[in-house]
Amino acid sequence: MVLSSLLGGILLVAMCWKISQLVKAPSDRVLRSVTLCILCAALSFPLGFKSVARYVDSLTSNGIAKLLQNALRLFHHRSELAKCSVSTAWTRPVIRVV
């Protein structure tokens, strides 16, 4: 439980840091993509706890918490990184894979 709380705290700090960077440079597409990835990870993290999953499932239906968690984890794959016009050689394979 302590390690999970530490990881959640690290995700929260990283999310706040990236959002503050994004406010300063809103036109940076790569930063938007990284911020979206961290945001999705931070939002899906609490849904992994059984107590939170039970609460979400009690509000909706069985399995909705897991569905939301998986949707948030997969959402960043369709981020703006694929739209970036970065011309360095090492990013081309990454953009093709995504």
Image (cartoon, rainbow, N blue to C red):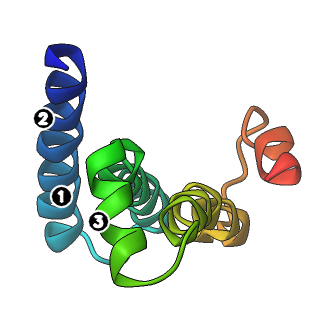
How crowded is the residue under tag 2: few (<14 C-alpha within 10 Å), some, or many (20+)?
few
Circle 2 SS class: helix
Check disc 1 and report the residue beneath it.
Answer: 21
The amino acid on which the numbered mark 2 sits, given as a three-letter code, is Gly
Circle 1 SS class: helix
How crowded is the residue under tag 1: few (<14 C-alpha within 10 Å), some, or many (20+)?
some
Q: Can see residue 83? A: yes
Q: Tell me the CA gap for discs 1 and 2.
A: 18 Å
Q: Quadrant of the N terminus?
A: top left
Could you say which disc has been placed on residue 9 in the image? 2
Observer-nearest of 47 and 42: 47
How crowded is the residue under tag 3: few (<14 C-alpha within 10 Å), some, or many (20+)?
few
User: Which badge, 3 or 1, comes first in the chain's sequence?
Assistant: 1
Q: Residue at x 52, y 63 (%)?
A: 72
Could you say which disc has been placed on residue 55 in the image? 3
Residue contact between numbered discs 1 and 2, judged by CB atoms under 8 Å: no
User: Looking at the image, is 24 positioned above or below residue 91?
Assistant: below
The amino acid on which the numbered mark 3 sits, given as a three-letter code, is Tyr
User: Which badge, 3 or 2, comes first in the chain's sequence?
Assistant: 2
In screen coordinates, is 58 left or right of 72? left
In screen coordinates, is 75 left or right of 42? right
Residue 14 % position (x, y): 20, 42
Residue 45 % position (x, y): 35, 46
Q: Residue furthest bottom?
A: 60
Q: Nearer the viewer, mark 3 or mark 2?
A: 3
Determine the image quadrant of residue 35: bottom left
Q: Tell me the CA gap for discs 3 and 2.
A: 21 Å
Residue 74 % position (x, y): 65, 59
